[in-house]
Each structure stands twice: as structure tokens, then as C-alpha cells.
Amino acid sequence: MAGKLNDTVRLTVGQAIVKYLQVQFSERDENKRRLVHAAFGIFGHGNVHGLGQALREYGTDLPFYQPRNEQSMVHTAIGFAKANQRLATIACTSSIGPGATNMLTGAATATINRVPVLLFPSDYYVTRHQGPVLQQLEHSISADISVNDAFRPLSRFFDRISRPEQILTALPEACRVLTDPAETGAVTIALPQDIQAHSYDYPTHFFEERTWRVERRLPDPQRISEAAVMLKNARNPVIIAGGGIHYSQAWDELQTFSEKFGIPVVETFGGKGAFRNESPLLVGAHTITGPTSAAKIVSEADLVIAVGTRLTDVVTGAQSGFRNPDVKFVGINVTSHDAFKQGALPIIADAREALKSLIDASVSVGIGPNLEHLENVASAKNEWEKQLRSEVYNDIPGEPMGQGQLIQTLNDSAQTGDTIVAAAGTPPGNLVNLWDATDGRKCHLEFGNSCMGYEIPGSIGVRMAQPNGEVYVLIGDGTYLLSPSEIMTAVQEGLKITVVISENHGFQSIRQLQMARAGRAFATEFRNRDESTGRLDGDYVAVDLAKTAEGLGAHVWKASTPEEVRIAMSEAREETGTCVIVAETHPDRYVPQSNVWFDVEAAEVSNDPETQALRTVYEEERKHQRFHY
């Protein structure tokens, strides 16, 4: 044994990183998988000679993918990790300078959403023999600052390697954070370009296979007992189900808890699909774009049980959604920071294990459904469904279909095992409302950062994790134009996705908000400049989105009616390659308002009477804001 511990192998830093990552595994519930599934990267002078050389020589079990944009490759890693319930991820390497800073948005998106990604931005020379180098940011009072310091507040763990032996501690700590449900997010290890090529005699046992167990933290029994008493005393309880339900695979426990005790469930963006089977107790999403039924039930609740959610403003209605003066909270979360929010009774535990314990405790104290509460839930749901039939799913002669009709058509076309992906604009808000996530149809929404440009690369990550079923992307034309290039990556790798572009000529979600807070449209649609006004309020700009997608290698359809969309979806399912459907939708046909408030202020001072009136409305609405301690 002593001899084995003293054995060494001489490798460069890049080579050692590749060899180490290939033998790291995660394990939960006796299910073992490779922790780092692949490497994505764009090579430049900062990494082609280091990590690039190492991947070529030693990356047998770390397949390399070639994306088109550094931000996008991090989004692909997020999509992959999320689809794997945070038990696996992808490593991303970039060159120095803009290659590194392009990853910043992806890092922020990962950390905000608590999703593990592993980033290796290249950095400037440690030796400094070269003087200031290409792409170096020179700081007048701090010689050791680089652009990679911008990753520090965006990362759950950050390190800059200045000596080859430092990876002996940096890499294990990176893996620990990646596999800790309470701490996970972006992990950044900055690699100076000279250090990547420097060598060291590494101990051979460093490269032995290691399994990182992802533990399920058990709840404190006293907290569970206290929560059961609170539930017994409640007349109108509600559960807010967040993304933690998916990450802990607590779907069955959630439904059992809800149905056994008659507790309605509302979902967050991250929690969409937490109820896998249709149920009269699934009220919909409680968000700024959710159904009025959810807003009604939450506003009347005297007990809110928040499971696996960060409770951001889009869920709490900017602290205005909980209007029962006696409302109390229970917070179930692996992260204590979230469990304590709203002055909740905190249950710091894995969601599945906490719900199991809470079910047993609730049975022991004799909790049963409140029939009056269940009737109220059924009535609220019926009213919302009537509103959808009358305002969303109907045709209006001579007008393009609304986005709600488009989603209804996608629902009709989707099958068990299919997944839909969205992130920014109107698609996530409408999908959290209208997508049917029961019977094995999944919904993958990135709305923690609401990151434009996530959709297509994120869906590639989902496809990498999900070999069967269709992977759909619902994306607005504004977001599509920001970053369509990863269609080529999907084509290159044979990773089939089907992108459905809702073409409504601009950023219509923001235009809707603009009209609600300013009363005037301004620079939110794709219009030509009007010579008479000098503003962008002329005719719509003529753009052929279908040709852009076709040029990147996709199979393309155009559709302007629900029936044409249905035909295109059917034909796309038969294709083996990436598909794009450009669907014309009406810019002004919105899904009905949720009655969940979003705190975006109208201007406090204005000479415009429209804005003045909206300011008065805003001041009345914000009177409902409350802090809960």
C-alpha cells in the first residue's frame, strides 16, 4: 500500500484534469452514473494547447462536443444536468478573454437555478514573462485581477490554478459542490494558459475511480410534528411545488400527500409537471402568468407548504399573493436559506424524505380533507377552464392563431415521453399555464434567470439526457434571433430537436408589460423606422426565419393555422434530424391575466396622462404587499 501511495505519473495540468474527470461518478439510491458526461468547448490560443491537447490524447471517456457559442454550451450543460435531476453534468472549456466572459451568463443562469455545471475558463499567464498579453484586462491597482474574477459572485465555488499541484485540492472540492444539493450551481476553475501545459508528478491514486454519494437529508422529527399540528389546524391549506420535487424525484410522495389529506397543489415554473397524473387537486401554476384559479386558492390559504422552491417574486406575487391575514408557512428545502423564507417553519431536508415523514405524522394526528375547501378548489378550476374555452382556444376569423391555440395544438400532438423546453418571453408563461404535463409529457422551463438564448442549447442538453421521445422547443422570434446558431450543433451531432418558433414580430411579453405600466408601446416590436416620427414604429420588418433555420441544416415548415401546425408536428415526428416549425401567431392575443401581481413600477412622475393613470393603479395594487416573519 505504501508503494502505491508513493507511485506518481507525470502529466500536464490539462491532462490530469481530463484523466480525473473521467473517473468521477455520482450515486443516489444505488443508481450510479458518470458525474461529468462530456466536455464542450471552443478552442482559442488560451486552451487549444492545454485542455485541447489533453482531450485529444486522454479523453477516451470524455467525449468532446463543438458548440457555436460559449454561453450556449453552458446552457446545454444546464439542460443536461436538469434533465438528470442534477446528478450529472457537462464540463465547459473556453479560451481567455471574450471566450471566458461569454460564459458568464451561463454561470449566472446555473447558479440562480441551483443547477451544477463545471466551467474551465482560460486565464492569463501566471509567469508574466510575456508582459501584457492578448485579451488581458490590465487593472491599474491590482495586477492579479483578470476578467475571470467576474465569475466569483456567479459561482458556488471558484478557484484560480497558479501551480500544477493545486488541482489536487481544487478538483475534489469542485466535485463535492457539484454533488451537494444544498450548495450546487456553477463551479469555476480558472486555468491560466501557461499552467495548462505545465507538468507535475501526480500521485496515481488521484486517478482512481471515485463515487460521490448524493445524500438524502432526513428531516428533524420535531419539525415534522410541528408541521403536522399546523396542518391539522388549517382549514384552507395549499402546497406550492417547486423544482425540488423533480430533483428529489418526489412525484409520488407529493401526489399521495395532496390526495390523502385533500390539499390543493400549485406549481412554480421549475415545478411544472410535479404532479405527473391528472388530479382535481392540481390547481395550476401560481405565478404572474398562472391561472386565476391558483391565485384565488393561494390568496385564501391559511397554511402554505412550500416544497423545493426559492419563492421568488413571480411566485409570491412580489409579497402580495398571500392575503389571508392568518396565513402561516412551512418551508421544505435542502437549503436552509430557502426553508426559512416567509418566516416559515423550516424543514431542512430532501423533499421526498420530508413528504414521507409528513404523511406518516399527518395520519397519526388524524388529519382529513376539508370538503368545503375541496368544493372551492373545484369551483375555481371550473371557472378558469370556462375562461380558456371562451378566450384562448377559439378561432377569430381573419386573424392569426393566438399563442394559446398554438400550445393547445402542441398538446394535442405530444405523446408520452415528449419534453418541451422554454425560457424567456411569453412561451414559458403560457406553457406553465397550458401545457399538459401529465401522462409522461414533461415540461422543462428555465425561468430563474429567464434567460433569452437558453432554449435551443438547453434542449440539446435535454436531448443528450433523453434519447427517447421528442424534444420540443417553444421559442419566440425575438429570442430565436438572439441565438439560432446551436441548431447547427444539433445537426452536427445528430441530436434531434424540434424548434417551434412563435412568430409574433417582437418581444410581445415585454410589450404587454410596457402597455400595463407605461401605456405606450416603444421599441419592443420589430418595426422599421418611420421617417415621419424618427422612431421604430413603421411596418413590421420582413424576415424569413424559415430560411435562416434551413441554412443551418434543419428541416423546415411554415404554419399559419392550428391544422397546419398539427400536420407539421406529425411530419416532424417522422424525421430523424433537427426540425424547425415557424408558426405565425397574433401579437396581441394574450392568455388571460393571472391576478398574481408583478412589482414593476409605473413612472412616479410623467406628463403622459396614460402613465399617470397607471401609476395610480400601481400604488393601489402595491398596498397588498406584506412581509411575513
Image (spheres, rainbow, N blue to C red):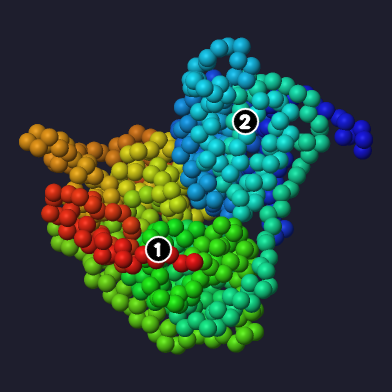
Which residue does the numbered mark 2 point to in the structure image?
A: 160
**SS at circle 2:** strand
Of the pair 29 and 543, the residue shown nearer to us: 29
- Per the rendering, the mark at residue 119 is none
Q: Residue 497, percent across and down? A: 44, 47
Q: Which residue is mark 1?
A: 319
Return the residue found at the far right. 2
Viewer-side label of 1, 2: 1
Classify 10 Å Cα crowding around label 2: few (below 14), some (14-19), many (20 and above): some
Query: Which x, y percent locates residue 120?
Result: 58, 33
| SS for callout 1 | loop
Image x and y of residue 383, in percent: 30, 77
Q: Position of residue 389 (x, y in %)?
A: 27, 71
Label 1 – label 2 distance at C-alpha: 40 Å
Mark 1 or 2, nearer chain start: 2
Q: Is residue 313 left or right of residue 32?
A: left
Residue type (three-letter) at the residue carrying disc 2: Arg
Q: Nearer the viewer, residue 381 or 96?
A: 96
Q: Which kind of residue does numbered mark 1 sit on?
A: Gln
Q: Residue at x 40, y 76 (%)?
A: 324
